[in-house]
Amino acid sequence: MRILHIAPFNIAGVPIEFVRAERTLGHYSRLVTLGRDRRGYEEDICLELPMIDDPILRLVKHVASSKRVLRKSNLREHPDQIPRVWKPRGMLECLLVRLRDRIWESRIMPSIRKYGLLDFDIYQLDGGLGFLRSGKIIKELKSRGKKVVCCYLGSDLRLRGVIPQIDSISDLNLTTEFDLRELHPDIHHIFFPFNPYRFQVMERRNKVLRICHSPTDRKAKGSERIIATVRELAKRYPVRLVLIENLPYDVAIKLKAGCDIMIDQLGELGYGISSLEALAMGIPTLTALTPEYEACIPDHPFIKVDEETLKERLIELIEDGQMRHRKGLEGRRWVERYHDSRTVVSGILAKYREFGWIDEYGNFIC
């Protein structure tokens, strides 16, 4: 079977991890990204389109786009409409999107011909976007009998919403984020695809414990409270804060590997790839979990915290080296059990068989 992933960026390395797993399971899989992620994640086919992530565009977005889309929060969304639907905010944004689609289409079509991008069986849109905001190319693929899968990874569905032209033709909707189950009437939750075997569990003997926090956006992680709490504890205990942000991926991973404790986030959005990296390294990890989320992963290895309990839980870990070691090993085993990308992709392929898209050998049928 031939599977093409299309994503605006290789977001947190998730799209390329899908691709690696699909290849391991015997399928021909490629990833097309519209732009290159600034953190330096692996690329496959990168179109490097203009007007996607430059300072001028960010300024225009700030002026033309809805303030709701631009804001960051660590709380769940409760929109009036399910699913939230993207639409341009006024004439200016409408004109800009149309202009960008015209420019992009002229750049995309040669790559489609060069790489044979119309010749795949299943198209997974990581981020639910596709090539153009108009959905033109994806609609053409759908008319040719191709299957369209949308996989939502976070703010794409929380803040932006579905692209109506894409959502109306999607054959299957997936999400790696637990809270997004409430934001679409027909969506299936899957675990983040992840390869824990890229990381080693190392014995840590730091005399001054290194507590790391790795926010992509501080508001979305409750970072100010986290930073303040660790700095307060550093006055009483041999600990130091390692703040990992705005760094190339390889640099961030090296910094994280030398840490003893990881704090993901305070809020309602659970955990992400950064936590999985820490757990795979045997680093005990603290994060906030809603009761609903925790009920779905009852054997999770996380040390559950909120704003009120963060300090207390950190002190327990700082003072108890055996607990740190035990929780670190629990975390590694849990990631291997649930997040191995081959297991995640096998579950998706089982859906394809259930829908009659592929036969028992994984060959595309219709």
Image: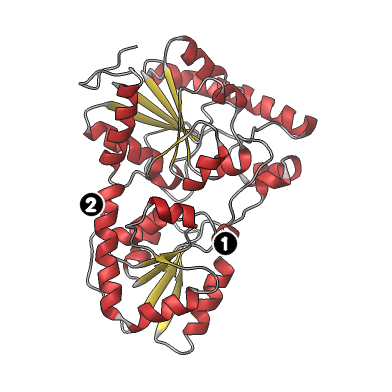
- Is 26 placed above or below 210 here? above
Quick check: 130 left or right of 282? right
In the displayed orientation, state which residue is furthest to the right: 91
Instruction: Classify the position of the N terminus by image quarter.
Output: top left
Pinpoint residue 41: horizontal percent, then vertical percent: 40, 46
Residue 208 in which image quadrant: bottom left
Q: Answer above or below: position of 314 versus 180.
A: below
At label 1, counting other C-alpha atoms closer than 10 Å, the crowd grade (few under 14, some 14-19, many 20 or more) is some
Residue position for label 2: 197
What type is the residue that disc 2 sits on? Answer: Tyr
SS at mark 2 in the image: helix
Examine the rendering and report whether any part of residue 122 can be seen: yes
The residue sitting at the top extreme is 144
Residue 208 visible in the shown view = no
For the point 66% across and 44% down, the residue is 69
Looking at the rendered structure, which numbered label has been put on residue 177?
none
Of pointers 1 and 2, the one earlier in the residue sequence: 2
Q: Do the CB atoms of the residues marked 1 and 2 lie less than 8 Å apart?
A: no
Name the spot of residue 102 as percent of width and height, x first: 63, 22
- Pick the front one: 33 or 69: 69
In the rendered image, which quarter is residue 346 located in?
top left
Residue assigned mark 1: 218
* Alpha carbon separation for disc pair 1 and 2: 29 Å
Q: On the picture, is 254 further left or further right than 263?
A: left
- Horizontal and vertical percent position of residue 261: 37, 71
Residue 34 located left or right of residue 96: left
Q: Secondary structure at mark 1?
A: helix
Residue at horizontal 32%, vertical 60%? 279
